[in-house]
Image (cartoon, rainbow, N blue to C red):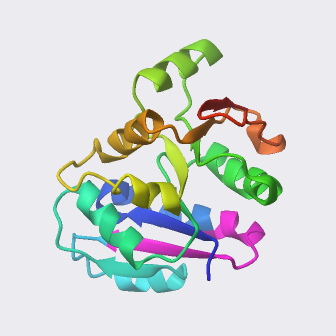
Amino acid sequence: MPTYSAILDARTAGAQLPRNLMAFDRVTGNWKNAHELLLVDDTGDRRLPDLARRHRATLLPCTASAQGARLNAAVDASHGELLLFPGQVDRRLVEWLSDWLPEVEAERTWDVAVLPVHRQGRLLRWWSWTQRATAGDTFWVARGWFELIGGFDPQLDSDAPADLLARLRACGARIWLASDDTARHKAQCPPQGGHCRG
């Protein structure tokens, strides 16, 4: 059974989808095949089946118009113990997923790990994220917690990921917020619920 399920939404990725899939080819080299890549699509783009095959992704056609419903459908089809919802796919994310995850997974003490979209200044990044997650943020969530809170709100579109993270935080999930240098350092989380610092 795959340990990690990475879920991409074709509509949200848009024209960046081929580039994002190439980035995941690099990332998953360190995951020792303990993963699956799922691509949920409501666009019906005829190019996607070939693109998915080339990058060893499972294409999941979906009729839901809201992002929350599409991502829930992808989770229902997934098998991983950890669910990855990538936001802004860039070199920083590739480094974080390639270098950091394999090192800390064996001693995981978090329920949710978040890599916020890059903002200038450490205090600004922390303050911005505590106020509201953004669409560019990438996060892992343990399947048990995802199921416990009922997944994404199926009525929400671009706000679905931020809403999910807010509910996880409100319910006491142990959240680890990554800093810029966490690709090279192990996470240190307190045993209590709440935000964790890298």
The residue located at (35%, 57%) in the rendering is 151
The count of marks equals: 0
Residue 37 drawn above or below residue 168 = below
Query: Which stretch appears magenta?
Result: 25-40
Task: Using the image as rendered, state which of residue 58 and residue 82 is in the foreground.
Answer: 82
The residue located at (23%, 75%) in the rendering is 62
Tell me residue 65's x, y (percent): 16, 61
Tell me residue 34's x, y (percent): 68, 76
Is 35 within the magenta?
Answer: yes
Tell me residue 150's x, y (percent): 33, 56
Tell whether 38 sits left or right of 192.
Answer: left
Is 22 within the magenta?
Answer: no
Q: Quadrant of the C terminus?
A: top right
Tell whether 15 sits left or right of 25.
Answer: left
Residue 85 drawn above or below residue 171 = below
Tell whether 124 sits left or right of 198.
Answer: left
Residue 106 falls in which quadrant of the image?
bottom right
Tell me residue 181's x, y (percent): 76, 34
Query: In this orientation, does residue 85 appear?
Result: no
Residue 64 falls in which quadrant of the image?
bottom left
Q: Quadrant of the N terminus?
A: bottom right
